[in-house]
Amino acid sequence: MSTQTTDLLDRIQDPETGREILDPATGERVGFAPQATAEDLDAAVARALAAQPGWAASGEDTRRQALHAAADAVEAHAEELARLLSREQGKPLNGPNARFEVGACAAWLRTTADLTLEPEVIVDDESGRAIMHYRPLGVVGAIGPWNWPMMISIWQIAPSLRMGNTVVIKPSGYTPLSVLALVEVLNSALPADVLLAVPGRGDIGDRLSRHPDVAKIMFTGSTETGKSIVKAASDTMKRMTMELGGNDAGIVLEDADPRALAEGIFWGAFINTGQTCAALKRLYVPDAIYDEVCEALIEVAKTMPMGIGLEEQNVLGPLQNRAQWEIVDRLVRAAKDSGARVLLGGDPDQEAAGNFYPTTLVADIDPQNPLVIEEQFGPALPIIRYTDLDQAVEWANALDEALGSSVWSADPARAVEVAARLVAGTTWINKHGAVDPRIPFGGARESGFGMEFGVAGLKEVAQPHVISQ
Ligand code: NDP
């Protein structure tokens, strides 16, 4: 075990009654995750509820400063947090992975701290004056996934606190230690009880979603669980933000330069070893440049080492859990069985200690193949050939998921025209999945509802209150 993470880990784990957490790259023990009971959850909500009025009354400047102080604390512990995250989640320290994720936590805290949501003057004329104010909601319940456990927690925590809410967060049962460590660090800079973590599995998440003293649920995870939470939370008419699964399409236009775009497409698809909600999960390429795009992607992919996260040279890691490995393996098998052409990877070492699945590129695949139409959430990219752009747009828009999408072209104006025809929360041009704390992000269709980030994100954790005179 790395000594750098020991102190923080000692403070958050529970070797007596906790659940053992294993490193997905090596199978070695990382630590023991405490398990909250229903009573623990109720007690946490009660504390958050009691703390909320004082936090709301503390004022904008106090909350801004507290979020900056929390960012300072994250930066002071950045290497410890990154190493723990790497060992528990599996992602390498380097590349757009663990150190990047911890850096993003600080960046989101700071940008969110500095946002301003002013009251809006709706009407001001001889008929009267109506002003819309944004008040805190109360206690926000946050439920998160295992792929970007720290960053997504911050996406839920930072705007909620900034608006004067308090937060009770339930981390994924796969990556609780990362979130508990982050919360421990944040709380070194925050007042008591404005942020409480309740580690547990789905039953604790369900109880949080039903809790009468929770005003809002912010959820990031699968569409299936999202639907269950919507039902559970509706009895108490909670506000909700749902960031759910995606199966993002990328469309390459005929004028694109394959070599210039290959690295961007690679990272759009393989960031976090493909375990990213808004990763590029199906790539549509015109016949005229199909072979060049495939060649360029193979060349880039071959230069990206995969391995144990703590080894500095690696930029791709294992799947976080075996269940996700099985999904990727099943989908790649389905592609192979259908006669699709595996350009790279596709043949995992079944005996390996960790959940490693090799970087896999699959060409000449039917547009309706399961590897295309089901979210693989791992390092396997189907590359679909098209001859007619209208057909590619139709395929891109055909699924229930509609989180992100991208258009790749040497002519940005033409790319924007194609982008306007796509159904998605975000369409990127010549990049994919590039989130920014200032730019609203959210899903269409079954990828969810509600926006995160920027002023739009603040509004989602606020109660509009119109005063009309
Ligand atoms: P899950 O939906 O399985 O789990 C997400 C969280 O919900 C976990 O903390 C889980 O707890 C909890 N949970 C499970 N059941 C319930 C319930 N009935 N009520 C309340 N909470 C519950 O997703 P994963 O963590 O497995 O993440 C993978 C999936 O999430 C992928 O499909 C991916 O597309 C999607 N995702 C979407 C993102 C987005 O921004 N749109 C970002 C990241 C992932 P526990 O695991 O401990 O049981």
Image (spheres, rainbow, N blue to C red):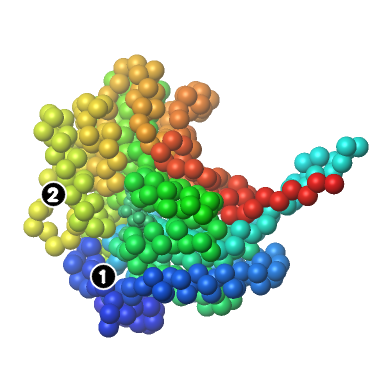
Residue located 60% across and 47% down the image: 456
Residue 293 picture quarter: top left
Q: Residues within 10 Å of mark 2 (few under 14, many from 20)?
A: some
Q: Is residue 282 left or right of residue 53?
A: left
Label 1: which residue? 21
Quadrant the N terminus occupies: bottom left
The CA span between labels 2 and 1 is: 24 Å
Answer with mark 2 or mark 1, whichever residue precedes in sequence: 1
Q: Residues within 10 Å of mark 1 (few under 14, many from 20)?
A: many
Amino acid of disc 1: Ile
Dot 1 lies on which element? Answer: strand
Q: Is residue 403 left or right of residue 332?
A: right
Q: Is residue 345 left or right of residue 443?
A: left
Q: Position of residue 280 (x, y in %)?
A: 36, 39
Give yes or no for contact between labels 2 and 1 (Cβ–Cβ under 8 Å).
Answer: no
Dot 2 lies on which element? Answer: loop
Amino acid of disc 2: Pro
Quadrant for ligand 1 reads bottom left
- The dot on residue 389 is none
- Look at the numbered disc 1 and say if its residue's Cβ is closer than 8 Å to ligand 1: no
Residue 101 picture quarter: bottom left
Along the viewing direction, whichever of 47 and 388 lies nearer the viewer? 47
Vertical side of 191 occupied by 431: above or below = above
Residue located 39% across and 59% down the image: 206
Along the viewing direction, whichever of 70 and 262 lies nearer the viewer? 70
Q: Position of residue 63 (x, y in %)?
A: 65, 67
Residue 166 picture quarter: bottom right
Q: Is residue 162 visible?
A: no
Label 2: which residue? 348
Q: Position of residue 221 (x, y in %)?
A: 38, 51
Q: Position of residue 296 (x, y in %)?
A: 28, 35
Residue located 70% across and 69% down the image: 57
